[in-house]
Image (cartoon, rainbow, N blue to C red):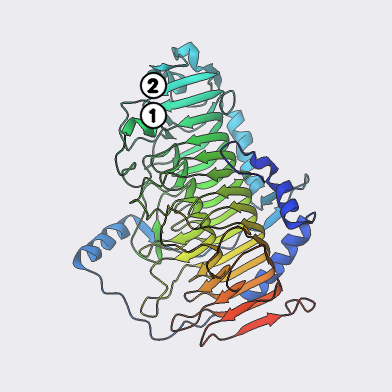
Amino acid sequence: MTSYGRNHDPGQNKVLLEEINGQQQDLKQIIQETEALFQQITNTPITPQQHQTSPSLSFTKKIEASVFRLTGEQFRIQQPTRVLLDHDGNVVPDWKDRLDEEYNRLLENLNKEINVVDCGAVGDGQTDCTEAFKQAIGDGRVKVIVPPGVYITKGIVLPSWTWLTGAGVGTTTIKLHDKAAKGTRLITNANHWKGNHHLFVQDLSLNWNVERLGSIPKTSTWGNHSSCLTYANVTYGWVKNVEGINPGLHCFDISSTLYNYAGDGYRARGGSNYVWLDHLIGYGFGDDGITTHHSDYVFISNSHMCDPSGRAHQQGYSNSNGFEIDDGSRNVLLVNNSSARCFGGVEIKAHENSSAASNVAIIGHISMNDNRSFNFRHIGHHKKRDLESRSAYNIIAANLAAIAPVYSDLYKDSAPRGMVVSAYKNVVINQFTVVGDPDYDFHGNPVIAVQYRARNIILNKVTVKDFTNRGPCIKVYGGENRADSVKIADCIPEEFELGTGTEDIKIFKNDKGIN
C-alpha cells in the first residue's frame, strides 16, 4: 500500500483515487451531479434556530474585538466559484482564465533575468546569501535564477513583478540561517500593508530549519510568521513545484496582512486574491501544511502534506491539518490533493471570534491515517447557548477517499472519523469512499458524523468498508444542538444512527436516488 510519505508524488493522486474507488471517474459527470445537488439544497430556505443567547464576553475580549474591527470589514458570502473542466480535462475554477491573463502580464513585465550566483550567492550550505538575494531581486520586474545548491538566508522578500525559480525540489534548497529569529518567514512578499502583486515561486525546496531552535516547546511566534512561504495581501500569485520543510508554523500560508478576530460577521482587510498553489510538498509543519486566511479565489491542486510536528501547539492538543481553509476565506478550490498522518486531512473552519470559510469546493482528495480525514466546523457555534454561525455556508466535495482514520498523538482525546460536519449549512458530499484497516480497532466510533447544528446536508454515494468494531456508517447527532435537514442516498452499507429529536432526515434507497 502507498505510504503517502514525504516522497509521495501527488501528481499520481487522480489515478490512485480511481484505484481506491474501484472505477474510472467521469469527472464531468461527477461535477455536474454535485452541482445539481448543491442547487437543490441552496434553494431550500434555512430558518434560524430559536433560543439563542449572546455570549458574555469579558471586558478584555470586548476591547480586543473592538480593536480588530478597526482593521476589519463586514463579511459577506460571495457567489460561489463554478468548477469547470479545461480542454485537457483538468479541474479548474471558473476564474482561472483571469489568472492566466495575469501570468502573461507577469512575463511581459520581467525586464531582466539574473542568476543569484552572479550577485555573490554560494550554494554551499554555509555562506550567508541574504545580501546576494536582495541584490538580485532589487525592486522587482526580474526573474531570479537559483541554480543547484543549498543557499543560506535570513529571509527573502519579494516585491511585485518577481519570479524566483530554482532547478527543482531537492536540487535547489533555500535554508533559513541558524541565527534567524523564530518569527522569520523564509519567503514572503515585500509589503504586507500596501500589498504586492504578480509573484511566482517555483522549483525549489524551502527549509525553515526548525532544528536551530532546539527543543523549545513552541516553534512559532504569532499571526502569519514562522512559515516557509507567506503571501500576505498578494494579488495574482503562483507557487509551483515547491517543498516546505519543517516550518515552525505553516509550510504555505495564503493570508491577510493580519489575522482578524473581530467576531463572526467580520473579516480582515488586506487578504490575498487569485493565488494558485500547485504540486507542493510539505512535512514537519508546526501547525498546518497549507492554510488560507481571509483570502479569496485560491486554487490548490496536486499537492501533498504529511507528518506534522505539531510543535506550534501544546503537546497532545495539536490541531495540525494537512490543508486548512480557515477564518474568512472564500471561494477556495482544492483538486486532487492528499494528506497523511495529520490531525485533519482537510479542515474547513473558523475560530469562534472570526467568520467561517465559505464557498469551498474539494474535487478529489486522499486522506491516509489522518485522525479526522475531513473536518468541517465553526468553533464556538455548536451548542444550544452559542450564537448560530452567520458565515459557515456552502461546501461541496466530490471524489473523496479516507483511508484508515486513526487515533493520533497530535490530539490525544480526539476520536477518529472519516468525516465530521459541524455548524455548516449547505454541504454536499458526493462519492466518498472510506476504507478502514481491518487490523485496527475502531472502538465503536461512527465513521461519519453530522452534528452540532449542521443543516442542509447531502451525503450521496458513500461507501464504507473494511472496518473492525466500528459504529454506524453515518451518525446524525440529536439533542438540543442537533443536526437537521439531512439527506442520505446510496450508502453502502445502509447503517445509520439518528439522534433524538432530529428533524427532516431523509434516507433514499440505493435504487431511488435523491429527488
Contact (Cβ within 8 Å) of mark 1 with mark 2: yes
**Percent coordinates x, y for residue 297 in the rendering:** 56, 51
**Percent coordinates x, y for residue 484 in the rendering:** 54, 81
**Percent coordinates x, y for residue 322 in the rendering:** 51, 49
- Whether residue 11 is situated above or below residue 388 in the rendered picture: above
Q: Which residue is mark 1?
A: 155
Label 1 environment density (alpha carbons within 10 Å; few <14, some 14–19, many ≥20): many
**130 or 437: nearer the viewer:** 437
The image quarter containing residue 120 is: top left
N-term mark: 1 or 2: 2
Q: What secondary structure is found at the residue carrying circle 1?
A: loop
Q: Residue at x 79, y 56 (%)?
A: 23
Q: What secondary structure is found at the residue carrying circle 2?
A: helix
Q: Residue at x 53, y 54 (%)?
A: 370
Q: Residue at x 32, y 38 (%)?
A: 183
**515 or 470: nearer the viewer:** 470
- Whether residue 143 is situated above or below residue 219 in the rendered picture: above
CA separation in Å, label 1 and label 2: 7 Å
Q: Which residue is mark 2?
A: 130
